Structure formats: structure tokens, C-alpha cells
Image (cartoon, helix red, strand yellow):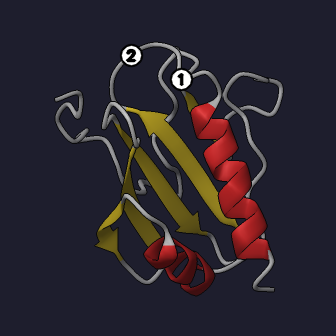
Amino acid sequence: MFSSARPNDLGVRDGRLAPCKPTPNCVCSQADPADRTHYIEPIRGTIADARHVLRALPRVRIIRDEAIYIHAEFRTRLLRFVDDVELYFDGHVLHVRSCSRVGRHDLGTNRRRVESLRRLIEARR
């Protein structure tokens, strides 16, 4: 119902994930660190670590799974909103972007999701 169409700007281009929209319902480790609304630190881990964690989570569908990139859709429990999560391994860290497809505010859901993924992925190190 509230899933909206899959964005066509996802993926890695020139070593970068898509920038966040100006709305506060997106976080990205490649945003400007001075941007406290959108910036989040990258995750210490690998794509294999991320893949293992994502496969164990409920309401997650992996859309693209490549050697250095994963795109997953997270569906919220109640209203079934779809959020896109991307993880890109640059050889050192996992860059991450988590963004809601619809709406303007997410009440911190994307930031909490990335911090939860961080704890799970980094626990595998």
C-alpha cells in the first residue's frame, strides 16, 4: 500500500552511493559529516558480514547482492512502508545508505536501523 516504486538512482557510481534527499528520512555514511541530519558513520565490516546479518533479519528482502554491494528492502511491521538500505564495501569499511521511499519524516527509523545493523555486523568481527 505505501511501498512506492523502487528508486532508479540506487547503486554505486564512481565509488559513491546516491546522496540523500533533502528530507530528514535518510542517512548515509557518504554525506557531509557536518550534516547532522543525514550523516552516519560507516560500518566496520565486510559484505560477507552484512549478507549474513541481513539474511537473518525479518521483513528484509535482498534485491541485489554483488561482491562489493548489497541493496535490501526493509518493510515496516505495521504500515508496510518500504525503506531501501544499501551497503557498499570500499575495501576498508561498509558505506551505508538507508532511505524511506515515501513521506518526509521517519522519526529516526533509518538511523536506528543502521545503528542496529552496525552492532550486528561489527559483532561478527
Residue 17, visible in the rendered structure: yes
Tag 1 secondary structure: loop
Residue bearing mark 2: 103
Q: Residue furthest front?
A: 78
What's the residue type where badge 1 is placed? Asp
Give the residue drawn at x 38%, y 60%: 72
Q: Are marks 2 and 1 in contact (CB under 8 Å)?
A: yes
In the image, is residue 64 above or below residue 22? below
Give the residue drawn at x 52%, y 43%: 98
Residue 90 in the image, given as x and y percentages of width and height: 62, 70
Spatial CA distance of label 2 from label 1 is 8 Å
Residue 63 in the image, given as x and y percentages of width and height: 27, 65
Among the 4 quarters of the image, the one containing residue 94: bottom right
Give the residue drawn at x 73%, y 62%: 118
Q: Is residue 97 left or right of residue 7?
A: right
In the image, is residue 48 above or below residue 13? below
Q: Is residue 14 left or right of residue 101?
A: right
Residue bearing mark 1: 106
Residue 38 in the image, given as x and y percentages of width and height: 66, 28
Name the image quarter holding the N terminus: top left
Q: Nearer the viewer, residue 86 or 90?
A: 86
Give the residue drawn at x 73%, y 31%: 32
Alpha-carbon neighbours of circle 2 within 10 Å: few (<14), some, or many (≥20)?
few
In the image, is residue 32 above or below residue 75? above
Tag 2 secondary structure: loop
Residue 124 in the image, given as x and y percentages of width and height: 75, 85
Report the label total. 2
What's the residue type where badge 2 is placed? Gly
Q: Point out which mark residue 48 bears.
A: none
Q: Is residue 112 left or right of residue 3?
A: right
